[in-house]
Image (cartoon, grey):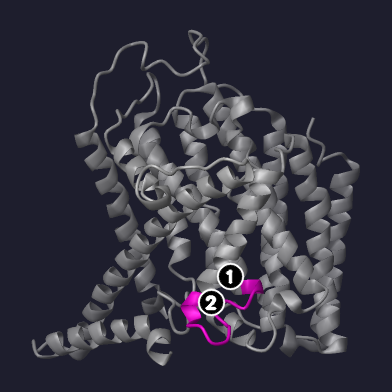
Amino acid sequence: MPIDYLPILVMVVVVVAFAAIALTLSSLTGPRHPTAAKLEPYESGMPPFGSARRRISIKYYLTAVLFILFDIEIIFFYPWAVLFRQLKLFGLVEMGVFVLILLIGYVYVWRKGGFNWD
Amino acid sequence: MDILNNLFTNIYNAINAFLNGLLGGAGLRPDAASAIVAAIMGLIVGTVVLLFGVGVVLTLIWLERKVAARVQDRVGPNRVGPFGMLQPVADTIKMFIKEDIVPTNADGLVHLLAPVIALAPAVLAFVVVPFGQGMQPADLNIVVLWVVSVSSIGTVGLFMAGYGSNNKFALLGGMRAVAQAISYEIPQVLTIVPIILLAGSMSLVQIVQKQSTLWYVFVLPVGLIGFVVYYISALAEVNRTPFDQPEGESEIVAGHHTEYSGMKFGLFYLAEYFNFFIVCTIATTLFLGGWQGPFLPSWLWFLIKTYALILLGMWIRMTLPRFRVDQLMKFAWQVLVPISLINIVLTGILLMFFKVG
């Protein structure tokens, strides 16, 4: 029922309003004396060098790709779990096959060193 | 006892009846009137839940500092109010009168939106939790999915903070936050599946009702394994020590909120404790029987169980040192994921052949 989602929609409005009020209020009550030194990015007191928008290590991408693979597969568990009692033995065997396929990919990633973080 | 138990539902019904009477007299079409009433009730409930959450966070900050002090043989905050209980309020006022500093070359819009995006999903996950008998602000039939999906959006806020600050420490913190959150998301989502299997439903209300005779944590061995895996990955998900690499102060200053000051930092702080409270409420609901319990009012039982889990989390935080990043990632992928996968299969077999739960 779409009407069930109404409280959530209202909640979005409430929380955004709360954040907006908090930020506006603090910008009114707080002082504002910017100096060049104060606005420098913090680098342990040293003058910052170079840009912070730099290239990112490849291992983060690998983690992200692994996450997408596994997360999509995991979503299939949810409807299966809800309907498990109706599917009976067929459902169990079916999911066994599914987990087996998932495990083959998992073992492959492990053997290839996909989980190594160095 | 009944009065106490139904206190909040009665207040809700009274306001609802009052509004219905008010609008019923105004000569609107019945469906329009009920929609307006629903919207107004949503607004009231939403505000109450948000304020309750903020109050909880304030007590949590005080509790955390007191517990930390006790563990380390100190006294902790004791100047502001009785037992220092007003310390978080004083801190909030302090945040309001601090200067808001945006570093040069920072992405102003991203920098501004990051704390809001970190906070909003936390509150949105809060709105579906059944706090007591008949006390869920919103009941969807896919609540479990809603909670896990919405609570992972908060990570985007952390990454925006890291990217928008034009600070190398912040960027590193943001990257680590994302990597950690998505790695621990997998065991967290997997370990809820046995609970759905046992309950046959994704609605938190029904999951709680099914636990009236036996809490799922006591469905051995799957419930206990699930609970432990869920709790560990939940702690990692909300970046608490020993999983606080994204803001490890000895390595990367303060991680993603290095460049945040004033109320923007306050919102991050709020979101962090909000998230911690939520994962404890979800763990209570899924594994510890939610509001089920004898004698005391249902919402009191719920709070007792939740605070027990929170104290456990604080204890863990004070006891264990921080993991290395590579240990952390390996732990998620090579220990927790296989355990929770096996747990699902085990639950299926137990349900099919041994009629547990």
Query: Mark 1, residues whose alpha carbon is within 10 Å: few (<14), some, or many (≥20)?
Result: many
| Residue B130 in view in this figure | no
Q: Which residues are magenta?
A: B286-300
Image height check: is B183 above or below B337? above
Q: Which residue is mark 2?
A: B301
**Disc ID at residue B305:** 1
Q: In this view of the protein, which residue sits in the foreground, B139 or B66?
A: B66
In the image, what residue occupies the spot 82% across and 60% down?
B339
In the picture, measured across the screen, residue A10 lies left or right of residue B66, that is left
Determine whether B230 is above or below B27 in the image: above
Residue B84: horizontal and vertical position, in percent? 41, 47
Tell me which corner region of the image, top left, top right, bottom left or bottom right, holds residue B306. Answer: bottom right
Q: Can you tell which quarter of the image residue B43 is in?
A: bottom left
SS majority, magenta? loop
Q: Is residue A64 left or right of residue B9?
A: right
**Would you say the residues marked 1 and 2 are in contact, meaning their CB atoms lie under 8 Å apart?**
yes
Image quarter (top left, top right, bottom left or bottom right) of the N terminus of chain B: bottom left
In front: A105, or B262? B262
Q: Nearer the viewer, residue B350 or A103?
A: B350
Q: Residue at x 34, y 26 (%)?
A: B101
Q: Position of residue B256 (x, y in %)?
A: 52, 33
Measured Cα–Cα span from mark 1 to mark 2: 6 Å
| Residues behind callouts 1 and 2 on a single chain | yes
Q: Is residue A115 inside the magenta stretch? A: no
Q: Chain of mark 1?
A: B
Amino acid type indicated by mark 2 = Trp
Instruction: Identify the residue at horizontal 73%, vertical 88% (top origin).
Output: A85
Residue B60 visible in image: yes
Q: Position of residue B205 (x, y in %)?
A: 53, 81
